[in-house]
């Protein structure tokens, strides 16, 4: 989870766009599935304020301590860290938003996770997924790959994935950070691949965002 701060930096614009598109606001209940070190959970906690609540869920028990530390550092007591697999997601209350980012690319099958996310939201609530199309990224024009991920291109199928789960597709788009030479994009790529792109132009994997809603 060491690169998460950097990831949050280069991909922060798609996150901000998605949360604004949904209109996350004070008092909302949200779940961040595959929360990792809690960057998104803390960002959500800032939006929902003291009356809201964020469930930060991750299958890795080490994430619970990391999320708790990040929430404490940010003074966000409304973040509740839970160890659960997304496939087994159970929360004490229905939520307004179920979110995941860079998670479905790692799971055995995305359908059960999205099914659980759809079940976790209230009627009229939102599911937001942000996943990459890794092979659409480029280093000096050459496609990127990520052999360690089970579904590196899962972003390409997200709209159908939510539609087939009975959710209403509200919006979907893709965004990719890009750069050339030293800077956060090159640093991020080096942290993922251990390859320094030098002065080569880089387009990081586009992140597909899907905003879906459970019909009222
Ligand atoms: C690449 S990190 C992404 C972290 C965070 N979502 C972000 O965007 O910064 C992937 C996280 O998903 C978690 N994860 C993987 N499979 C999972 C599953 N089946 N259920 C819940 N979490 C899972 C991992 O433990 C890891 O913390």
Image (spheres, helix red, strand yellow):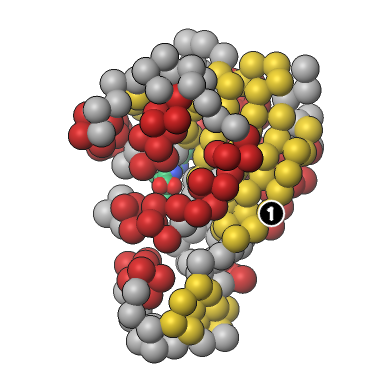
Q: In the displayed structure, does residue 71 sit left or right of residue 57?
A: left
Dot 1 falls on a residue whose secondary structure is: strand
Q: In the displayed structure, does residue 119 sit left or right of residue 196?
A: right
Query: Crowding near pointer 1: few (<14 within 10 Å), some, many (20+)?
Result: some
Rendered image quadrant of residue 53: top left
- Above or below, 160 against 196 in this view is above
Q: Mark 1 highlights which residue?
A: 173
- At x 55%, y 39%, the residue is 19
- Would you say residue 41 is visible in this rendering? no
Q: Position of residue 204 (x, y in %)?
A: 50, 69
- Would you say residue 180 is visible in this rendering? yes
Ligand 1 sits in which quadrant? top left
- Quadrant where the C terminus sits is top right
Residue lying farthest top? 92
- Above or below, 94 against 146 in this view is above
Q: Nearer the viewer, residue 31 or 146?
A: 31
Q: Position of residue 211 (x, y in %)?
A: 67, 40
How many tags in the picture?
1
């Amino acid at each position: 989870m060491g690169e998460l701060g950097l990831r949050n930096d280069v991909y922060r614009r798609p996150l901000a766009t998605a949360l604004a598109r949904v209109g996350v606001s004070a008092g909302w209940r949200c779940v961040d599935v595959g929360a990792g070190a809690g960057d998104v959970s803390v960002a959500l906690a800032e939006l929902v304020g003291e009356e809201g609540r964020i469930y930060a869920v991750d299958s890795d028990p080490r994430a619970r301590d990391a999320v708790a530390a990040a929430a404490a550092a940010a003074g966000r007591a409304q973040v509740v860290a839970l160890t659960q697999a997304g496939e087994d997601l159970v929360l004490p209350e229905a939520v307004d938003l179920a979110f995941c980012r860079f998670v479905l690319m790692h799971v055995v099958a995305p359908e059960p996770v999205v099914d659980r996310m759809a079940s976790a939201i209230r009627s009229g609530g939102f599911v937001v997924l942000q996943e990459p199309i890794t092979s659409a990224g480029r280093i000096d024009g050459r496609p990127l790959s990520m052999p360690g991920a089970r579904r590196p291109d899962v972003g390409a199928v997200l709209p159908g994935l939510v539609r087939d789960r009975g959710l209403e597709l509200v919006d979907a788009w893709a965004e990719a950070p890009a750069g050339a030479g030293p800077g956060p994009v090159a640093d991020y790529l080096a942290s993922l691949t251990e390859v320094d792109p030098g002065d080569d132009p880089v387009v990081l994997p586009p992140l597909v965002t899907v905003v879906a809603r459970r019909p009222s």
